Image (spheres, rainbow, N blue to C red):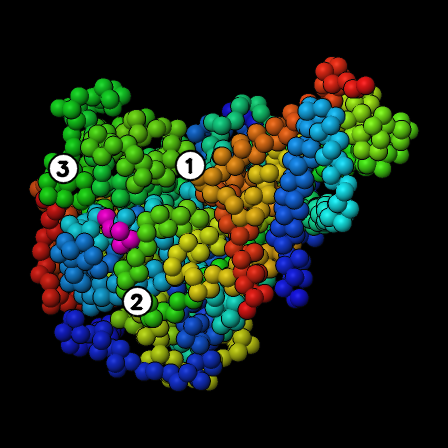
Amino acid sequence: MSVLDSKIPAGSLDKKWEQYKFNAKLINPANKRKYEILIVGSGLAGAAAAATLGELGFKVKCFCYQDSPRRAHSIAAQGGINAAKNYQNDGDSVQRLFYDTIKGGDFRAREANVYRLAQVSVNIIDQCVAQGVPFAREYGGLLANRSFGGAQVSRTFYARGQTGQQLLLGAYSALNRQIAEGNVEMFPRTEMLDLVLVDGHAKGIVARNMVTGEIQSYSADCVILATGGYGNVFYLSTNAKGCNVTATYRAYKKGAYFANPCYTQIHPTCIPVTGDYQSKLTLMSESLRNDGRVWAPKKKGDNRPPHEIPEDERDYYLERKYPSYGNLAPRDISSRAAKQVCDEGRGVGESGLGVYLDFSDAIKRLGEKVVRERYDNLFEMYEQITGENAYKTPMRIFPAVHYTMGGLWVDYELMSNVPGLYVLGEANFSDHGANRLGASALMQGLADGYFVIPYTIGNYLVSQLGKRPGTDHPEFKKAEAEVHARIKRLLAIKGRRSVDSFHRELGLLLWDLCGMGRTEKSLQRALKRIPILREEFWTNVNVTGENEELNQALEKAGRVADFLEFGELMCLDALQRRESCGGHFREEFQTAEGEALRDDEQFAHVAAWEFTGEKKPPIRHTEQLEFENVHLATRSYK
Amino acid sequence: MNFITSFYNSSIGKKWIVALTGLVLIGYVIGHMAGNLQIFAGPEKINAYAAFLHSLPGPLWVIRIFLIVCLVLHIVMTIKLAVENRSAKAQKNEYQATTSFKPAKATMVLSGLVVLAFLVLHLAHFTIRSIDPRFHELPRGEFDVHSMVILGFQNVWYSGFYIIAVFLLCLHLSHGFQSLLQTLGINSKKVRLPITYGGQALSWLIFAGYVAVPIAVLTHHLTLVP
Amino acid sequence: MNLKLKVWRQKNAQSEGKLVDYEARNIPPAASFLEMLDILNDELQAKGEEPIAFDHDCREGICGTCSLTINGIAHGPSATTTCQLYMRTFKDGETIYIEPFRARSFPVMRDLVTDRAALDRIKQAGGYITARVGSAQDANSTLIPKTAADLSMEAAACIGCGACVAACPNASAMLFVGASVTHLAALPQGQPERRERALRMVRKMDEEGFGNCSNHYECEAVCPAEIPITVISNLNREYAAASAREAAI
């Protein structure tokens, strides 16, 4: 038996969650306030969990590195949130959302988790509407929907191009209510720097006050990490600048298993890179593909302006290759197709790394007014960044790192292998397999926070009454000392390179060697080069200032130091997964037509990595994925 | 009573008081203008109007006191708000700029103060009649407003100050009218432009109405009727 | 392009700050304003000098973290967030003043970083609908006219950056509070707590030391989310109505 027990309840798929909830242990209301819960991160998952657990009566402390919980990067999600409401009467159901998500994830996610996600998706919409999220409406007052990549039904709810913002503000407002009522205490501008285990259980964290530099311990009955993904390991990504892997990586180093780190999602519709000074990539919502047509010139090196390229010299390659899904092919497939086009020398723009997303047909068909209503803020954003008007000339887009499906391993209860450590949202690995469908991240974050963790946390907590250690426990003192020592070490290097220059170099390296296409050779090279770069970091970085102040260089240095270790783990995982699936494309494993070639015999499992010590190779554990309800098919969107 | 103090103490409450008193004062400004313009209908008309007003000593004083209270409240609340506002902006930018230059908005306090100074002079001049001794011996007796106005405006200095003051008053109103509706919660996407331009048009109509009298006097279109 | 910068430097909340001159050299016009500061900071750090601290996060105009006053205007010359301002907006050789968002309620923590937690506290005072998880009815059971949903969304688009406060000569937060109150008052779900919400948020706003609106409308001009000043008008009405109701009952 594997060391990884996913604790999936017995019974038929559609009854598992009901059955689980019935069997779950409850905590007497009077006892709830005796428990303290730490939540790190205040995005959709973290804020929703903090608000809900606070509402239930637990004492919650919530931490975020931003100056306000409302700034978490969930806010940047544009397109929408999926739910199996079937309001459009177009054949949607829980079963279909489940199947689309499993298939979209290239059959590398757990059936039971995904089914539960599809089940609670309908409650999320109800909850958000009740909170006052102003979803788009039809004239009759009903909720509007749109279709999204990887699905043939319209099940995506949206609020202009700012769905993530509105959902986060909904969760933030629920959180605010709990803060006002005294059930949640909020710690903004506070960064978790270590996890504290007492007798093998997660019982607290060590965090740094980012204004005063004070290092402080917080103890609790359990710890929830909702700290998002690690896309910034690539330096350039669509993540916010502050997004980092530190919380989950620190937990990994304290014994939590890191699952499938090689599953990274490259989003097909981002604004192309313009120069080496660039600090981030901007995503244009995938919803644009509903009405925009993706194309590249048929001829290599055709650098005529787009309007001079006649129709028959344009290659609408997504429509050509995937006639039934066309421009709505899932993200990994669309991204790879764009890469192929550019590799063939047919890319557009100065760098040759770009393809067109053209709205002229939509404008002809619907009129500019309708297009403006649907996407105006996106067009505006595009114009601000590029100085081009996309109503007149096609947008130029290119794939960029966007989301990470990998994360800390969790069981059905969202608890990691470390007792008392829960992981929610993008920070865990659970629901998206090897590729996430559009509009599913918001769904998962809120599902975990509002509807899963409140039910599953009791099973653990019920056995923990009165076991909360004080922060004077030696384990806390030890962790604090380690944090202090590490900061001191970073500040003492006083080398000649800035933190950013290392981050940029690491990112470029990973993008080239462990990006959209990976090979055994490229990964071996990356594994050789990362330790060298890390070595240089620890001898030649210049972290200015001191700890006892607001020190942004120090904050970044700590995060980059973790990325420099984590990047290696990601490449190692990519190397060991000798198949292509979803966002993980090993060039050695592809079909004659260039599609991903899975190896279900050997790799229909989760790879979860165990840290064994500095400079020691981590151990790869596996959790076999059982597919009892879906047939493992070759994923086809043709 | 708790309600009144808490409303009064709130920022929005004070703004409401400024706006409501402003509305009353605008009403007065328009009424006064209508009275003034009767001068063009000859001495009988306007003098009769003045006599009529004075024949109602009760209501006249009620109205006067009401207007004075409104004026005082308007000024006191504005000062209170200005003090709070100054303290809210503890440190100003080293580089001072605004997105666009709006003279009416920028000069609300200044125009208000100049108008206040004018008001004192104007009342002393025409209402209390303590400046020009000729006002005590008017050809048609105590209520010969017609002659009083013409005598008064024949003084170029006085007319000049009057025109400047009325200009500032109307500048004040050109922003004030839209502002007070905004404060009273009357604004929306649809009515915004009509209110803004309507308020400005009204202000400059008022300006024309007031300034017509001194201009007519100075250009000899209005002369003493023997 | 090359630029002369005058940047507000301040060690911490307790110390005095001042403008310090810097030169930004070889800045690509396609770089964003914050990337220009990144380039400068990289140079400063290479020299062992402390980089200029400024708040930023998403760099795509939605999180509301970035908060610079550029040449006296909150978020600078284009009506976007600072992070969406591109250097091609400026002329080669230009002198640029960079200051924090200034207001008594936004104390400077370091350089260009300010503490805007007062806005969170106003939200905590009542900027929510009480909707216990698990108790929501079906989302389509209450019909909401598209016009109401659109009006609500327009106000809900506020990103909470505080530029309205920084731009206001009175450091008033009424555009922010007005947006919040309008967002929820436009929806049927927001009705039960409508009056109480307006009273509590305005009282908190006053308590936090923000100024009052004197109708300059600078807030609207700089707002990256294009929140219209009609939300302030709406707030004035909501507050007065709520006060009247409080008095009556």
Amino acid type, label 2? Gln
Q: Are marks 1 and 3 on the same chain?
A: yes
Which residue occupies the foreground of this view, A118 or A229? A118
Q: Is residue A570 above or below residue A38?
A: above
Which residue occupies the foreground of this view, A351 or B125? B125
Q: Is residue B4 above or below residue C224?
A: below
Q: Which residues are magenta?
A: A140-146
Q: Which residue is mark 1?
A: A278
Q: Which residue is mark 3?
A: A319
Q: Are marks 2 and 3 in contact (CB under 8 Å)?
A: no
Q: Are marks 1 and 2 in contact (CB under 8 Å)?
A: no
Q: Is residue A337 left or right of residue A617?
A: left
User: Circle 1 — which element?
Assistant: loop
Give the chain of mark 1.
A
Decide: few, some or many residues near mark 2? Use Cα within 10 Å; few <14, some 14-19, many ≥20.
some
Q: Are marks 1 and 2 on the same chain?
A: no
Badge 1 or badge 3: first in the primary sequence: 1
Q: Which residue is mark 2?
A: C137
Q: Quadrant of residue C47?
A: top right
Closer to the camera: disc 2 or disc 3?
Answer: 2
Q: Position of residue A304 (x, y in %)?
A: 25, 19
Q: Are marks 2 and 3 on the same chain?
A: no
Q: Residue at x 12, y 51 (%)?
A: A635
Give the chain of mark 3.
A
User: Circle 2 — which element?
Assistant: loop
Q: Is residue A108 left or right of residue C31?
A: left
Q: Position of residue B133 (x, y in %)?
A: 91, 29
Q: Is residue C63 visible?
A: no
Q: Residue at x 55, y 44 (%)?
A: B182
* Quadrant, the C terminus of chain A: top left
Closer to the camera: disc 1 or disc 3?
Answer: 3
